[in-house]
Image (cartoon, helix red, strand yellow):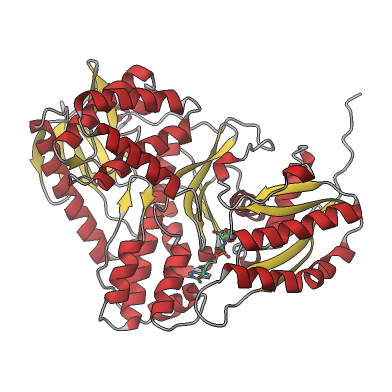
Amino acid sequence: MPELKPPVGEVLGLEGTAWNLSAAVFGDDLVALHSSPYAPPTGGIHPREAAQHHASVMREVIARVLPAAENLQAIAFSQGPGLGPCLRTVATAARALSLALDLPLVGVNHCVAHVEIGRWATGFDDPIVLYASGANTQVLGYLNGRYRIFGETLDIGIGNALDKFARSHGLPHPGGPVVERFARDGNYIELPYTVKGMDLAFSGLISAAQESKAPIEDVCHGLQETGFAMCVEVTERALAHAGKDEVLLVGGVGANSRLQEMLREMCEDRGARFAVPERTYLGDNGAMIAYTGRVMLEHGALLPIEESQVRPGYRADEVPVVWRSEPGEAVRGLTLEGGPLRGAEAVVEVQGGDVAKRRVSKRYRNELLDRRLITERTRAEARLIAAARRAGVRTPVIRDVTADTIVMERVEGDVLKYAMSEETLRLAGVAVGRLHGAGIIHGDLTTSNMIFEDNRCVLIDFGLAHVSAELESRGVDLHVLFQTLESTTDEHEELKAAFARGYAGVFPGAGEVLAREREVELRGRYL
Ligand SMILES: C[C@@H](O)[C@H](NC(=O)OP(=O)(O)OC[C@H]1O[C@@H](n2cnc3c(N)ncnc32)[C@H](O)[C@@H]1O)C(=O)O
Ligand SMILES: [Fe+2]
C-alpha cells in the first residue's frame, strides 16, 4: 500500500521586510490575514523606525490571526532580502513563537514568496515573472530547480525610483500611487530609456524626471511610459529567450493599472497569457510567507533555529525550489526554415541567401517612444555591425537599410544557447575582446546573439550597441552574458572562465573589465 502522508495543517507566516508588518495563517486556503503598515511621517522609510513600528505592533498583529488556527504546524518568516533591523525584529518574534508553541521554523525568501503566492492566486504554472516592487525589479523564470534571474535592475527598484521622484517634489510616500494619479492627466514627454540585454537601470530616468521643467502631470506620464516600457521590454525578451507562454506580474508596483495594461497588450500580441493576483497578494503581505512556508514544510524544508539568522542580501536564485520537480526547460526555438521568426523586438525572414530583420511597432509603447526606439536601434545596429566588421569581428554583411529594416547576409550555424561548451565560450570571448578593443559595446550579449559558423563566433543583433571605451559599459556588457549563463546552466563558472581566457587573449584591458563585471554583479546582490 502506498504510504499516506499526514495532511499538513496550517502555517503561520510573518512578513516585515520593509513597510508592512503582516501575519497570516494559511491552510488549504487563506485562513486569516492581518497587516499593520508603517507610514513614515516624512521622507522615505527609515529602517530603524520601521523596525520599531514592527516591534510595537507585533503582539497585536499576531494575536489577530493566531486564534483562527486549528492545527498549526509551523512558523514561517521572511528571512530576507530586506532591511536589516526589520528582518531581525521579525526573526526574533518567529523564534519566540516557535519555542513557545514547540513548532518548527521555516525561513522563506521574500522574493520567492511573491512568486509563489502569485502562482497560487492566478493558477499559472510556469510563468515568466515580472517582480516589480520597491526594492526589486527582476524578471524571473523557473529552470532546473531554481528561480533564475534573467534580468534585473542594475541600480534601484522601480518602486523606490517612483518614491524618490515623488519625494523630490514634496509628494507623500509611497510615491507610486501618486505618480499614477498625476500621469492620467498628463502628456508624454521624452526621458532616458535604459535597457541592457535583460537588465535595466532607473537612475538616469529619475534624475532627468526630477530636473524636468515640464508640468508635473507630464513628467509623471513620461516617467511611467518610459520606466514601464523598459520593464515590459525585458519581460518580453525573457519570454522569447525562455520559450514560455505565461506572464505573471507581482510586487507592489504591480498594482499600477498602466503597467498591467502594457503587459496585457504585450502578451496578447505575442499569444502569451497574462495574469496579476488580486491586490491583497501583490504588495508585501503575510499570506505569501504563510503559503510558501506551508509548501516548503510539505517538502521538508525546515530551518533549524541555530541557522535562523536573517539574510538581508538573500537572492531568489539561492533557494533550492524542492517543491517543483519539473525541469522547466525551454522548448527549442523555431528556425528560420519554418517561416518568419518572431523575436522579442523584430521579425526575421529569409530572402534568398540573406535575411531581412524588421523591427515591429509595439502596441504597449507610447507612439513617439516606439518610433524613437525603432529608428535609433535600426540605425545603431546597421552602423555598428559595419564598424565591428571593420575591426575584425565576424558580423553579417549589411546589404540594405531602411527606417525599420536591415537586410543582411544570412549566417548559418547554432546559436550559443544550443552550442554551450568551453570552446564556444572561448571563441565568444575572442569576438567580444576584439569588439571591446575597437571601442564598441554590444549591449545585448545573450546566448541567442552569438552564432557559431566555421569555428568562429559571429556576433549578431546590435540594436542596443553603442560606442564607448568606459570600463563600466564594458563590465555591464560582460555582466549581461554571465547572467544569461547563470540563468541557463549549472556549469556557468567553467564557461565564464573559458570566456575570460578568450577575452583576455585579445584584449589588453581584460583584467580590469572582468574585475568591474564582478563589482556590477555584487551591486545587484544587496538592497
Ligand atoms: C524586500 C521587500 O521589502 C520589498 N518590498 C516592497 O518593496 O514592498 P511592495 O509592497 O512589494 O512594493 C512597494 C512599492 O510599490 C509601489 N506602489 C504601490 N502601488 C503602486 C502603484 N499604483 N503604482 C506604482 N507603484 C506602486 C510603492 O510606491 C512602493 O515603492 C521588495 O519586495 O522588494
Ligand atoms: Fe516585497
The image quadrant in which ligand 2 is located: bottom right
- Quadrant location, the N terminus: top right
Residue 415 visible in the picture? no
Question: Viewer-proximal residue, 151 or 60?
Answer: 60
The residue depicted at 21 percent of the width and 47 percent of the height is: 470
Question: Viewer-proximal residue, 84 or 229?
Answer: 84
The residue depicted at 52 percent of the width and 61 percent of the height is: 133
Q: Can you give x and y, in whole percent of width and height, for residue 66 in the image?
A: 86, 63
Q: Can you give x and y, in whole percent of width and height, for residue 82 in the image?
A: 59, 58
Q: Can you give x and y, in whole percent of width and height, for residue 342 in the image?
A: 33, 41
Number of numbered discs: 0
Question: Viewer-proximal residue, 87 or 349?
Answer: 87
Q: Going by the image, does 407 lie left or right of 192?
A: left
Up the image or down, 517 lies above or below 99; here it is above
The residue depicted at 76 percent of the width and 43 percent of the height is: 306
Residue 310 visible in the picture? yes
The residue depicted at 8 percent of the width and 40 percent of the height is: 400
Up the image or down, 514 lies above or below 429; here it is below
Q: Going by the image, does 423 lie left or right of 411?
A: right
Q: Can you give x and y, in whole percent of width and height, for residue 412 in the image?
A: 24, 22
Q: Going by the image, does 521 lie left or right of 248?
A: left
Question: Viewer-proximal residue, 510 or 178?
Answer: 510
Q: Going by the image, does 13 lie left or right of 407?
A: right
